[in-house]
Amino acid sequence: MDQKRLEQEKSFHDKRFGEKDVREKLNKYYSVNKHVWERYTQMIATYCNEKKLLELGCGTAINAEQWLKLGAILTGIDISSEGIKKAQQRVASCTYKQKPEFFVMNAEKTDFKDNTFDIVIGTGIIHHLDLKSAYKEIHRILKKDGHAIFLEPLAHNIFINIYRRLTPNMRTADEHPLKIKDIKLLRQYFHRIDVEYFTLFTLLAVPFRNTFFFNSLVEFLRLIDKTLFSLIPFLGRYAWMAIIHAQNPKK
């Protein structure tokens, strides 16, 4: 990882975790993604019970308790020392059988031994990294029957990209929402890649988030998205979010 980029990422996230989060304004958009998170969690739950799980970009470990409840033997890493400090504070009184560990570490070049983890996960982290370096490292530290599961934003929707350009302070200079070719690059390292796409027309519900019919509207639009992605797979690239599941590292 180029040192300048590393320092920029570290500085942005130290500030984000140490002060008021500049990304709080995005919460109104994430309000339509509850079903995405539920699906992501469901997939992780399938593979993590009593398994060694590494969360890349764990931040302040806001998801730690969820992974622990699912039975994971949890390790988290983040480039931000401020994030890891708060993560360690969060679990200081942890009563789970396997106490989680958190480290300040570069996800593109970790300190872990080969074949350490059963599952590697990340929420909105891969698009901050150099993909070839990150994929190669994930491949290295996963066991031969391991799983990598990531929830990531995509780069092909022109309207979402316009919003991104209008709000540059909410993201780092080097982050790059994933293109389809970025996902296909995983095929160099894994035998199987599955992708599920989410949130295209569902975004239309955002202006109605404070209304009594918001949840019903989200569910209706979600079903439209699901149907369209099934009937016309090409539309998946214009979704906002994707869950990427890479299985069986090529050894």
Image (cartoon, rainbow, N blue to C red):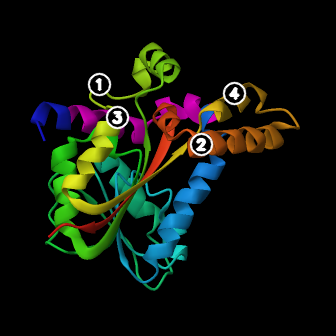
Q: Position of residue 78 (x, y in %)?
A: 30, 52
Q: Please determine whether, in this image, residue 175 is positioned above or below residue 233.
A: above
In front: label 3 or label 1: 3
Q: Is residue 30 left or right of residue 46?
A: right
Of the residues under marks 2 and 1, which one precedes in the sequence? 1
At 20% across and 62% down in the image, what residue appears? 139
Which of disc 1 and disc 3 is earlier in sequence?
1
Name the residue tied to disc 1: 173
Foreground of the two, 103 or 51: 51
Task: Say the numbered circle drawn on residue 179.
Answer: 3
Three-letter amino acid code at disc 3? Lys
- Indicate the amino acid at tag 1: Ala
Residue corresponding to mark 2? 231
- Mark 3 against mark 2, which lies toward the viewer? 2
Residue drawn at (34%, 68%) of the image: 147
Assess disc 2: are there few (<14), some (14-19) or many (≥20) residues with their C-alpha within 10 Å of its C-alpha: few
Mark 4 vs mark 3, foreground winner is 3
